[in-house]
Amino acid sequence: MEIRLQKYLADAGVASRRKAEELIAQGKVKVNGEIVTEMGCKIDPKKDEVTYLDQKISTKDTKMVYIMLHKPVGYVTTAKEQFGRPAVMDLVKGVDARIFPVGRLDYDTSGLLLLTNDGDLTYKLTHPKHDVDKTYIAKLYGIPDEGALQKFRRGVVIDGVRTKPAKIRILEKEKDGRFCTAEIIIHEGRNRQVRKMCDAIHHPVAQLKRVATGELKMGDLQKGKFRHLTEKEVKYLKKL
């Protein structure tokens, strides 16, 4: 049975499906010795030979790895970074697989980040049509009134597009009114979305941490540390 080349690369743990498309476009992938750059290319895993950077790729012996990392502030979520800043991959050394982040957390945001070599799962968790709750704890400047909270909940316009409805509740207010702590739950994963939504209600983010993806919670995992997901957690993610 033929499958799309980018899916085959994802199944082999080379990269997420979206990243695999970039690799194909960059001419880094060959099928039967010929460079392929078209996204519509399909291959027969039983007959065709696929190479990435001239190394043969196979899905036969790919062991899937699923990791939860407590990302600290000051790390980028890309594998390599042009400015030489620390990357999250520096924190998961010793993992015997080519893993990649599921989505992103901003440089200034900490918290739960999933990493895997399961391209299909990455695609499902990051695709806009799959609404997966993402829960954050945010320290905000000032204290939003009820009007601002309702505006946030209905969705606000950022980058010219209205966000989907979201949840926000105040957990704690500082006595001097300078800051508050809020729990925020969104379904989308747009660039710097929580920060931009908070800017839109005139209560910018001072600190931001993601504490859960769906029912998967970070718990007491220490900053900069990672753990492998349990079998139960993996099954839960695949059912989303």
Image (cartoon, helix red, strand yellow):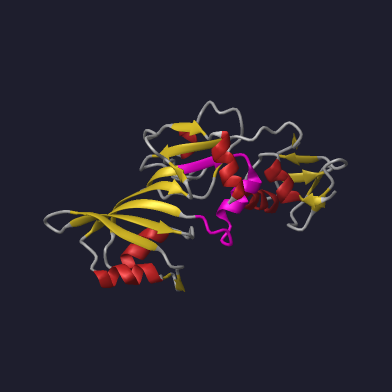
Magenta residues, start to end = 113-132
- Is residue 12 toward the left or the right of residue 45 in the image? left
- Is residue 79 toward the left or the right of residue 32 in the image? left
The mark tally for this picture is 0
Q: Is residue 211 magenta?
A: no
Q: Residue at x 49, y 60 (%)?
A: 188
Q: Is residue 44 above or below residue 173?
A: above
Q: Residue at x 67, y 53 (%)?
A: 21
Inspect this view and state whether residue 86 appears. Answer: no
Inspect this view and state whether residue 173 appears. Answer: yes
Considering depth in this image, is 49 or 61 the residue closer to the camera?
61
Q: Residue at x 35, y 68 (%)?
A: 152
Give the farthest residue toward the right. Answer: 47
Give the farthest residue toward the left. Answer: 176
Q: Residue at x 75, y 57 (%)?
A: 38
Q: Is residue 126 magenta?
A: yes
- Is residue 112 toward the left or the right of residue 203 in the image? right
Asked which quadrant contains residue 74, the reply is top left
Q: Is residue 4 above or below residue 15?
A: below
Q: Position of residue 84 (x, y in %)?
A: 44, 40
- Is residue 62 toward the left or the right of residue 175 in the image? right
Q: Position of residue 182 (x, y in %)?
A: 29, 55
Considering depth in this image, is 76 or 82 the residue closer to the camera?
76
Q: Position of residue 76 (x, y in %)?
A: 44, 44
Asked which quadrant contains residue 154, the reply is bottom left
